[in-house]
């Protein structure tokens, strides 16, 4: 209970103010937040459960789906529970170390997810452009190693940011107008020089988002070239259908991020609560929709989910012996 008595002047504490201007609507806003979060957890845990239980799904593509599901769970869990504490309980206090830890995990998860999308694009490229060698090029062990490399890259790039912010002197008024510890909002509370941190943030975004988008664009350029060489229209459609789910997930990940970044940079007329709502939706909507998209577009997962759902919903069969 001592956490409720802390003020923004406490040198070891920040205040997360939720969504400024919409404090009266926090309870109502918490409803879609909690619903999206629950659907996200159910969908992604279902993907993990089905793939782990079915030996026939122990393949590179489904291993990548499990990695994506883990990052979806991690990303939303970094933000939503604390946001709900703000909305429901008014518990706005967060320690400086807790704030920087949240920031580190959030950016590590985002960087890992971007790497997984690149590996997925490479997976689709091999499946379409070199299908005969797919099983030898993309083994489960190789996919796991690529995922580990993506995780290590994300951690190494995310780690310096909280360490640099930790060294900044902060003002007495330590109120963050956000639901989570967003770096630019934290930097605004500092009276120190933040040019190095801003430059590092920009370079990191270019290294992760810029490089990854370039690799994805290159993969799909090669895929389109290979598809255009196929004379059969049916083969065209089959080849492109294998990429549909990945394209949808990729657009859901990158487009809202770019839109939010552009509104921050050029949308001076956009109110603060709109920026904050957009930032939260970027963390809530993709994790909720990703398992739905792959469940609809991937027949194997759709069939297995249907099978397990029917088993759970149907009463246990009872054998009666004739008297």
Image (cartoon, helix red, strand yellow):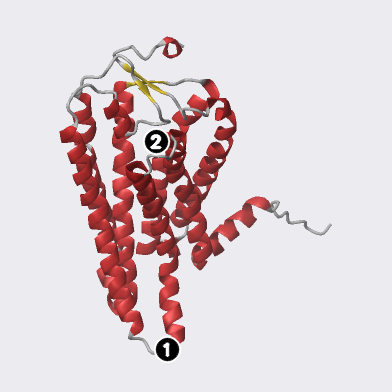
Badge 1: residue crowd in 10 Å (few <14, some 14–19, many ≥20): few
Residue 311: x %, y % from top left: 63, 55
Report whether 43 appears left or right of 194: right
Report whether 72 appears left or right of 205: right
Residue nearest the observer in this picture, 151 or 317 = 151
Report whether 152 appears left or right of 17: left
Badge 2: residue crowd in 10 Å (few <14, some 14–19, many ≥20): many
Residue 272: x %, y % from top left: 43, 34
Residue 32 seen in the current view: yes
Which residue is identified by label 1? 232
The label number, if any, that marks residue 78 in the structure image = 2
Report whether 131 appears left or right of 273: left
Count of marks placed on residues = 2
Residue nearest the observer in this picture, 282 or 61 = 282
Q: Mark 1 and mark 2 in contact (Cβ < 8 Å)? A: no
Residue 82: x %, y % from top left: 44, 29
Residue 277: x %, y % from top left: 47, 38
Residue drawn at x 55%, y 58% is 305
In this rendering, the answer to whether 171 lies above or below 195 is above
In the orientation shown, which residue stands out farthest toward the bottom?
231
Helix, strand or loop under label 2: helix
Residue nearest the observer in this picture, 130 or 313 = 130
Instruction: Give the position of the C terminus as an image quadrant.
Output: bottom right
In this rendering, the answer to whether 134 lies above or below 57 is below
Q: Earlier in the sequence, mark 2 or mark 1?
A: 2
The label number, if any, that marks residue 45 in the structure image = none
Helix, strand or loop under label 1: loop
Residue 152 seen in the current view: no
Residue nearest the observer in this picture, 292 or 233 = 233
Determine the CA span between mark 2 and mark 1.
Answer: 47 Å
In the orientation shown, which residue stands out farthest toward the front?
269
């Amino acid at each position: 209970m001592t956490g409720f008595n802390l003020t923004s002047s406490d040198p070891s504490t920040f205040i997360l103010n939720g969504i400024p201007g919409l404090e009266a609507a926090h309870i109502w806003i918490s409803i879609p937040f909690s619903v999206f979060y629950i659907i996200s957890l159910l969908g992604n845990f279902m993907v993990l459960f089905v793939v782990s239980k079915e030996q026939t799904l122990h393949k590179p593509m489904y291993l990548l789906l499990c990695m994506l599901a883990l990052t979806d769970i991690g990303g939303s869990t970094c933000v939503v529970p604390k946001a709900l504490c703000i909305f429901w309980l008014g518990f706005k206090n967060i320690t400086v170390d807790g704030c920087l830890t949240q920031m580190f995990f959030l950016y590590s998860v985002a960087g890992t997810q971007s790497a997984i999308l690149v590996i997925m694009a490479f997976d689709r490229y091999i499946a379409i452009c070199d299908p005969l060698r797919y099983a030898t090029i993309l083994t489960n062990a190789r996919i796991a190693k690529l995922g580990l490399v993506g995780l290590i890259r994300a951690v190494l790039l995310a780690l310096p940011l909280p360490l640099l912010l930790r060294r900044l002197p902060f003002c007495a008024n330590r109120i963050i107008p956000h639901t989570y510890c967003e770096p630019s909002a934290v930097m605004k509370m500092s009276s120190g020089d933040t040019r190095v941190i801003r430059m590092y943030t920009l370079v990191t975004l270019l290294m992760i988002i810029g490089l990854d988008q370039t690799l994805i664009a290159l993969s799909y350029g090669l895929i389109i070239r290979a598809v255009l060489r196929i004379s059969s229209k049916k083969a065209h459609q089959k080849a492109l259908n294998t990429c549909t789910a990945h394209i949808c997930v990729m657009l859901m990940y990158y487009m809202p991020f770019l839109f939010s970044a552009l509104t921050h940079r050029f949308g001076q007329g956009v109110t603060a609560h709109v920026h904050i709502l957009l930032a939260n939706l970027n963390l809530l909507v993709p994790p909720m929709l990703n398992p739905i998209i792959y469940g609809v577009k991937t027949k194997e997962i759709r069939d297995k989910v249907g099978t397990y759902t029917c088993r759970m919903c149907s009463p246990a069969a009872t054998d009666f012996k004739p008297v």
